[in-house]
Amino acid sequence: MEFSERTIKIIIDDEKCKGCSTHACVEACKTYSRGILVLKEDGNPGVVDSAEELARKGTECLACEYECWFRGNKAITIKAPIEGLDEYRKKHGTA
Ligand code: SF4
């Protein structure tokens, strides 16, 4: 599953969540952000808010990804586009 906040996209590989015993992502979201990531009835993390609410409530703190990588099953990838980065890298030969 995937969802967006204001500028970032959170991608969760549900297959990797099967068998996860910590659900560290949900705890991290509740502790460090506004709890937009919740545990669904099927045992996987997910969101219940509308796209507009997610964009408004999300703090883009990245805590879910960090906690999942250290205490979960490395299921979360966050894409955080940086405006102008491609041009900058081309200009400095690091593209
Ligand atoms: S911590 Fe990672 S593996 Fe565990 S439920 Fe959350 S996203 Fe899935």
Image (cartoon, grey):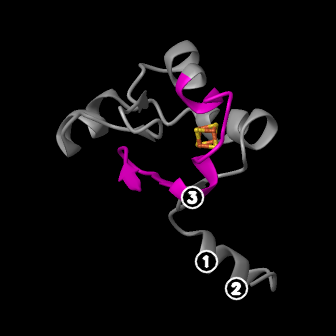
Q: Name the residue under label 1.
A: 86
Q: Which amino acid does label 1 sit on?
A: Asp
Q: How far apart are marks 1 and 3 (CA)?
A: 32 Å
Q: Distance between the residues labelled 1 and 2?
A: 6 Å
Q: Distance between the residues labelled 2 and 3?
A: 36 Å
Q: Are marks 1 and 2 in contact (CB under 8 Å)?
A: yes
Q: Mark 2 points at which residue?
A: 90
Q: In this view, does 90 lie to the left or right of 30?
A: right
Give the residue drawn at x 43%, y 29%: 39
The boundaries of the magenta stretch are 1-26
Residue 43 rendering spot, x and y as whole percentages:
47, 35
In the rendered structure, does residue 91 fall within the stretch colored magenta?
Answer: no
Quadrant containing ligand 1? top right
Q: Is residue 84 above or below residue 31?
A: below
Residue 87 rendering spot, x and y as whole percentages:
60, 79
Q: What element carries label 2?
A: helix
Q: Is residue 89 left or right of residue 53?
A: right
In the rendered structure, does residue 13 fall within the stretch colored magenta?
Answer: yes
Mark drawn on residue 15: 3
Q: Which amino acid does label 2 sit on?
A: Lys
Give the residue drawn at x 29%, y 37%: 54
